[in-house]
Image (cartoon, rainbow, N blue to C red):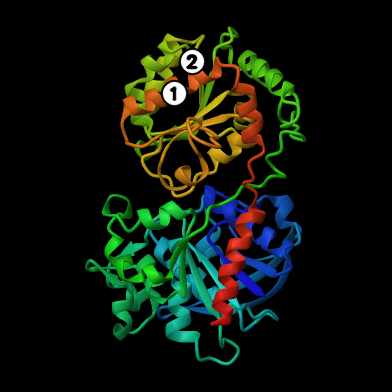
């Protein structure tokens, strides 16, 4: 099969979150399975010079954005055997950062329309186009309304993947004709609650809708999780499914990772003790045999930081130490800084995004706390298990699908159900008791053998694509 992924970001060229990890890793796994999988994304100003130097200019064409005709240059790159097409327009993409501009709607309307135009200029006709999040949600809309019956565009199937339903691409009705460039008789496809909603348009027109975990696929039918989109999905359940994301097991490999103090494996975990000692020394924490809980996250409420704040003293009183890395809302940053100042031998806080330190926390911590209010998939719990660090999570979204409580059969972490601080504290307490038991090392070895590689996820996507092509 020929498969085209399109997204607003993808590793190694541009990244702001988990979307880039997925789009940078999944096509590589699909390619290993024998399919031709390519990626289209914008050519941003912030792409590293060493990557830009390797790009090859292919061609240029114009793209209709409402009543405008905009230049689009096409550059080609190849990373890990996957071909990338990077779309160049300096007016839209030669800016600092990826998002947060007043004209984001116009920028990503351009991207979606340019993806469709690109197909008539390159020697590659996809069987499947997989779009990701609201920034490329108009690709299936344009295909259904404009391109479907053009020569060379026959029999293309579209898949739309929801990575986070909170971000939908909502704009005023005026953008329909002024920017999107569709006639008013198509307004029903995109109109939702008196506004243009790009994600809703993808729900209406894509052949399949996927999410990044099975649990998230049914959670977004519930008003508690859907951010208002449950009514748009209620009649689309027949084409909705969820596949759990994977992680890059070559990037996150405790046997070869050069960023940690000592390499280790599921067969020999002795190196993990050295990683813990090195982490405690680096962070100036007490080396008294206490369990170290790692927290690597954005400091925002839906990540469960308010629960951590509410019972933080109680967790310290259990005898736990904390290695915390992240940034976000000021009230949470200030709280963690205060706790670090008050209990500097038990709490280390580093503000910001420090990937090298994150790797050392994954390898050196004993447990990893992730009490999210909602979590479409989550990658951190899988990375922590890869490094033999036991996750403590709330049962939601991908956390529910990837972590099983150690109190049951084949457990690989510690879980709690309700969004309640003392339920979380109980899970931490159980993890602490287990840490001091004889079975802890066996549990560490067990979780390191879990398979969260992209290869297993890719099989599910390939099965979906094949079923669409057979229709």
Q: Judge by depth and name the residue closer to the eye, 188 or 267.
A: 267
Q: Judge by depth and name the residue closer to the eye, 41 or 175.
A: 41
Identify the residue shown where x is 48% and y is 15%.
320
Residue labelled with disc 2: 320
Q: x, y (%) of residue 66?
A: 40, 78
Residue ranking furthest to the front:
409
- Work out whether 426 lies above or below 290: below
Identify the residue shown where x is 43% and y is 47%.
397
**CB-based contact (under 8 Å), mark 2 and mark 1:** yes
Residue labelled with disc 1: 428
Residue 16 seen in the current view:
no
Whole-number angstrom distance, CA of label 2 to CA of label 1:
9 Å
Query: Which quadrant does the N terminus fall into?
Result: bottom right
Q: x, y (%) of residue 470?
A: 58, 81
Answer with mark 2 or mark 1, whichever residue precedes in sequence: 2
Identify the residue shown where x is 39% and y is 71%.
238
Q: Judge by depth and name the residue closer to the eye, 302 or 272.
A: 272
- Work out whether 141 lies above or below 104: below
């Amino acid at each position: 099969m020929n498969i085209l992924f399109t997204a607003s970001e993808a590793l190694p060229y541009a990244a702001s979150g988990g979307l880039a990890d997925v789009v940078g890793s999944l096509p590589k796994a699909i390619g290993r399975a024998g399919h031709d999988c390519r990626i289209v994304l914008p050519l941003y100003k912030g792409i590293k010079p060493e990557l830009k130097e390797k790009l090859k200019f292919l061609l240029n064409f114009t793209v209709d954005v409402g009543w405008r005709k905009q230049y689009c240059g096409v550059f080609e790159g190849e990373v890990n055997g996957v071909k990338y097409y990077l779309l160049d327009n300096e007016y839209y993409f030669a800016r600092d950062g990826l998002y947060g501009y007043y004209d984001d709607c116009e920028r990503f309307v351009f991207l979606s329309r340019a993806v469709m135009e690109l197909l008539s200029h390159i020697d590659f006709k996809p069987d499947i186009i997989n779009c990701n999040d609201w920034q490329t949600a108009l690709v299936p809309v344009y295909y259904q309304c404009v391109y479907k019956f053009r020569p060379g565009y026959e029999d293309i199937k579209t898949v739309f993947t929801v990575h986070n339903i909170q971000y939908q691409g909502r704009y005023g009705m005026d953008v329909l004709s002024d920017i999107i460039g569709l006639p008013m008789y198509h307004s029903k496809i995109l109109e939702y609650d008196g506004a243009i909603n790009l994600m809703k348009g993808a729900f209406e027109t894509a052949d399949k809708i996927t999410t990044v975990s099975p649990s998230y696929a049914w959670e977004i039918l519930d008003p508690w999780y859907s951010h208002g989109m449950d009514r748009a999905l209620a009649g689309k359940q027949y084409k909705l499914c969820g596949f759990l994301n994977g992680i890059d097991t070559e990037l996150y490999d405790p046997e070869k990772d050069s960023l940690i103090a000592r390499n280790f494996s599921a067969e020999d975990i002795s190196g993990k003790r050295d990683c813990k000692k090195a982490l405690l020394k680096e962070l100036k924490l007490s080396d008294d045999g206490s369990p170290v809980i790692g927290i690597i996250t954005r400091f925002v409420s839906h990540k469960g930081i308010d629960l951590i704040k509410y019972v933080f003293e109680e967790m310290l009183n259990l005898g736990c130490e904390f290695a915390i890395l992240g940034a976000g809302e000021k009230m949470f940053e200030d709280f963690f800084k205060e706790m670090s100042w008050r209990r500097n031998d038990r709490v280390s806080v580093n503000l910001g995004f420090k990937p090298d330190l994150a790797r050392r926390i994954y390898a050196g911590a004993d447990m990893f706390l992730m009490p999210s209010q909602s979590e479409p998939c989550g990658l951190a719990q899988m990375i922590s298990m890869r490094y033999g660090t036991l996750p403590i999570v709330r049962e939601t979204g991908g956390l529910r699908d990837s972590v099983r409580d150690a109190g049951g059969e084949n457990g690989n972490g510690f879980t709690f159900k309700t969004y309640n601080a003392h339920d979380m504290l109980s899970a931490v307490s159980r993890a602490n008791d287990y840490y001091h038991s004889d079975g802890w090392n066996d549990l560490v070895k067990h979780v390191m053998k879990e398979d969260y590689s992209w290869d297993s996820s890719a099989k599910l996507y390939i099965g979906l694509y094949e079923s669409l092509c057979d229709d």
